Amino acid sequence: MNLDAPRVLVLNAAYEVLGLASVKRGVLLVLSGTAEMLEESGEHLHTPSTRIPVPSVIRLRRMVRRPRTQVALNRRNILRRDRYTCQYCGRQGGELTVDHVLPKSRGGRSTWENLVTACRACNLKKGGRTPEEAGMRLLRPPQAPRLPLFLADFKEVPEAWRPYLGL
């Protein structure tokens, strides 16, 4: 087990999602009394004299106030939102670009609702046209992310996290 992998969901005292912590950090927060374990992962760390359960979800005992900020609109986050998949043909990985659904030359703005991930071939095929004009369909309409984008890196969200994420 990689102790530095981000595999522990961290909630504040009001059960709001704060982010992910490494296994090592999650265990230390629980052992120090800073956090309580809400869900176990089913795995254990072994010391010479004890077995320590590895948490899957922890809740901080004190409220941590974080201002609600919007997710930064940048290339990396658009790729993460679209799960590194071309929104026109469904191809994953490879050389991906960011495409304006309504081209900038026609007044299209750089917003969550107008930017999608596209492979080079689809981006070239679409050119300065709208998808309808190019005879192409979007797999999903683009929208601002409603879940934390760190979840996009998980192929499948752990079952223990679902109640806390509203899934």
Image (tube, rainbow, N blue to C red):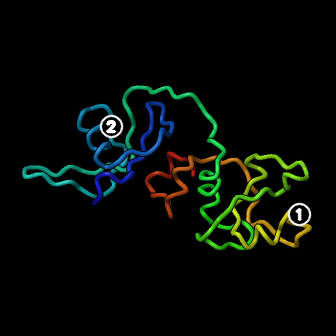
Instruction: Identify which residue is drawn at 46% across, 58% down.
Output: 159
**Is label 2 or label 1 in front?**
1
Q: Does label 2 or label 1 sit earlier along the sequence?
A: 2
- The Cα–Cα distance between marks 2 and 1, rounded to whole angstroms, is 53 Å
To which quarter of the image does residue 115 belong?
bottom right
Task: Give the percent coordinates (x, y) of residue 2.
Answer: 29, 58
Instruction: Identify which residue is drawn at 70% across, 47% down.
Output: 144
Q: Is residue 89 above or below residue 65?
A: below
Instruction: Identify which residue is drawn at 78% across, 52% down.
Output: 114
Task: Give the percent coordinates (x, y) of residue 24.
Answer: 28, 47
Task: Give the percent coordinates (x, y) of residue 69.
Answer: 61, 33
Residue that label 2 marks? 36
Q: Which amino acid type is shown beneath numbered disc 2?
A: Glu
Q: How many marks?
A: 2
Q: Is residue 159 above or below residue 12?
A: below
Tell which of 132 and 12 is nearer to you: 132
Residue that label 1 marks? 129
Are the two marked residues, 2 and 1, in contact with CB atoms closer than 8 angstroms? Answer: no
